[in-house]
Image: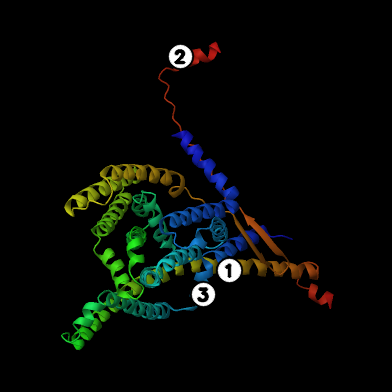
Amino acid sequence: MLNEEKIQLMTKLAIYEQREGKKEIPMSKYFKSDYVSINMVKTVIAATINYFLIVLIWLLYDLEGFLNNLTNINLLDIGKIILVLYIGFILLYMVIAYVVYNYKFRQVRESLKLYNAGLKQINKIQEEEGKIKEQIEMGGNDEYDESFSN
Amino acid sequence: MMSLLVIKEKLKQFYSKNDFYLIPLIKFIGVLIILSLLNSNIGFMALLKNIGVVLIISLVCSFLPMSLVIVIISLVILAHIYTLSLELAVIVLIIFLIMFLAYYRFAPRDGLVLMLMPVLYMLKIPYILPIAVGLVATPVSIVSVIFGTLLYFILKFISSNTVLITNISDDNVLLKINTLLDGLLKSKEMYLAMAAFAIVVIVVYVIRRMSINHSWSVAIIAGGLVNLAVFLLGNIGFNITDGGSIGMLVIGTIVSIVIVYILQFCVFSVDYSRTEHTQFEDDEYYYYVKAVPKIKVTTPEVSVKRINARKTRRTRTEK
C-alpha cells in the first residue's frame, strides 16, 4: 500500500538532497568551530597563492626598473615591505573568511534541522507501518495472538 | 496592468511546463552570443572561429552546469589570446587565477556576472548589469562587477592594439607584458567605469531595500540617473575623450533601464520554482517522482468603479 504522506515527505527530502543538500549534508559532520577553522586554513592557502601571484605580476610589470636599480635597492627593505603587506593581506582574508563561513554555517544549520526533522518523521511513519504490518501478519492486534501462532 | 499580470502568470506556467527544454536552450543561445562576440572582437584563433566549432561548444555548454560553462568560456578567451601572444595569455591566466582565488571561491555563482560584463559592454549596454546586480544581489557582488569590467578592458585593449602587440618582436617578452599592464593601469576610462558601477550597485541596493512604494522601479530609475551623472562628470573631470560619445551613453542608459525594467517584471519578481524529477526507494518500492510546483493563479483584485453605471446598463440592454 502506498502511503501518500510518506511519499510527499520523501519527495521533499529527495529534492533537497538533489539540490542544496549535495553540499550541505556533508557539512553536518562538522562542529561549527571545526568547519570554520578548516575553511579558514583553506582560505589562507588560497590567499597566499593569490598574494604571490599579485607580487609576480607586479614584478613582471616593473622588472626592468627593478633590474636597473638592483644595486641601489636594499633587498632587505623590499623583503620587509612584501612581508608586512603579506601579513596584512592574510589578516584581511582571515577576517572575511571568519565572517563568511560563520554565516554560511548558521544558514546551513537551519535547513539541516528541517531535513533531520523530516527524516525523523519518515522514520516514525515507517515504524508505525511496521507495527501495523506485524499485527496484520499475526492476524489482528490481540495481544494473545502470539501464543496462537506458535 | 491586469493583462500584464496575466502575461506574467502565463510565462510562469510556460516555464514550469517546459523548463526541461528551456534551460538548455537559453544556455545554448547565451553561449552562442558570447562566443560570436568574442570571435568578432578577439578572434585570433581560426579554429575557434569556425562556425561548426562554435555550435559544438555551445551545444556542449547547454548541458553543463554554469560553473563549467564559465571555465570553458575562459579557456576560449585564453586560446584566442594565446594565438596572438603566449606572454599575454600567461598574464591573463594569472589574472583569472587571482580573480578566482580572491573572490569566486566564496561566490562561484557570481561568475556569470564576470562573463556577462564584457558581453554587455560589446553590445554597448553594460549599464544593465550594475542595476540588475543591485536589484537581485548584495553589495558584495560589486567585486564581480569590477572584475567583469577589468576583463572587458583587457579584451578591449588586446583587440584595439593587435597590430602594436604583433609588431613587438618575440624576444621582447617584457615589453609585450608591459604594454598590456601599462595600458590597463593607466586607463582612466576603466577606473571611471569601475567607480560608476560600484556607486550604481550601492544606490540601487539601498533604494530597493527602502520601504517605500514602488521601491524597485524607483531604484532602477535612480540607478540609471546616477549612472548617467557619474559617467558625465567623470568624463569631464578626467578629461576622457575616447570613452564614446555622450549620445551613446544616454541612449545606452535609457535602453538599459528599459531592459532591466522588463527583466525585473518577467524574471526577478517571478518565482520560477521548477519541476523536479527525483527518485528514491523504501523497503517496498522504487519511486520515480515528477514533482510539479503548484501554480497559484492569482486572480488580481479588481475594484470596478461604475461612474456611468446607467449608461453601461443601457448599452447592455440595447445589445
Q: Name which residue type carries label 2.
A: Lys
Which residue is the site of mark 1?
A119
Q: Is mark 2 on a helix, strand or loop?
A: helix
Q: Which residue is drawn at 18% across and 82% down?
A: A69
Q: Mark 2 lies on which chain?
A: B
Q: Which residue is drawn at 30% across and 44% down?
A: B248
User: In front here: A53 or B205?
Assistant: A53
Q: Name which residue type carries label 1.
A: Leu
Quadrant that contains the C terminus of chain B: top right
User: In this rendering, is residue B100 above or below B265?
Assistant: below
Q: Residue B133's quadrant in the figure?
A: bottom left
Q: In this view, does B91 lie to the left or right of A133?
A: left
Q: Which mark is residue B311?
A: 2
- Of all residues, the one furthest to the top in this rendering is B318
Q: Distance between the residues labelled 3 and 1?
A: 16 Å
Sequence-wise, the earlier of marks 3 and 1 is 3
Residue B140 shows in this picture:
no
Q: Which chain carries label 3?
A: A
On whether disc 2 and disc 3 are found on a single subunit, the reply is: no
User: In front here: B198 or A78?
Assistant: A78
Where's residue B140, x and y in %?
Answer: 33, 62
Where's residue B63, x and y in %?
Answer: 57, 60
Which residue is the site of mark 3?
A26
**Comparing labels 1 and 2, the label whose residue is closer to the camera:** 2
**Comparing labels 2 and 3, the label whose residue is closer to the camera:** 3
